[in-house]
Amino acid sequence: MSKDDVVIARKSPYPVDVTEGKTYFWCTCGRSQDQPFCDGAHQGTDFEPMMFIADKTDKVYLCGCKHSTRPPFCDGSHQKL
């Protein structure tokens, strides 16, 4: 499987409460059953999860369509799919 095989998990963002300093792993392949986070479903593909550390405790909107130009955050790209 290649990067062209990304699965659109959903055409809207995932609102998620994050904690400052905590590490998160955002799913890049769209196959995780634990969206928007990685559960290892990318194994055997060219995908790897994207690690990010929350810079503050807040609600963030993580990309669900996997087409954002600002991953892991939603940029509205789902509106063009």
Image: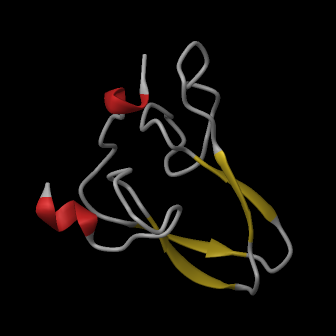
Specify the farthest residue to the right: 21
Specify whether 4 is left or right of 79: right
State the residue at coordinates (63%, 33%): 39
Q: Position of residue 34 (x, y in %)?
A: 54, 41
State the residue at coordinates (54%, 78%): 60
Quarter the N terminus occupies: top left
State the residue at coordinates (55%, 31%): 47
State the residue at coordinates (33%, 31%): 4
Q: Position of residue 51 (x, y in %)?
A: 72, 54
Q: Quadrant of residue 14?
A: bottom left
Q: How is the structure coloured here?
A: secondary structure
Q: Quadrant of residue 81?
A: bottom left
The image shows a total of numbered marks equal to 0
Specify the farthest residue to the top: 44
Specify whether 55 is left or right of 61: right
Picture layout, residue 4 above or below residue 63: above
Residue sitting nearer the eye, 77 or 36: 77
Specify whether 71 is left or right of 65: right
Q: Position of residue 62 (x, y in %)?
A: 48, 65
Picture layout, residue 7 above or below residue 68: above
Specify whether 45 is left or right of 52: left
Specify the farthest residue to the left: 80
Q: Position of residue 67 (x, y in %)?
A: 34, 54
Picture layout, residue 45 above or below residue 12: above
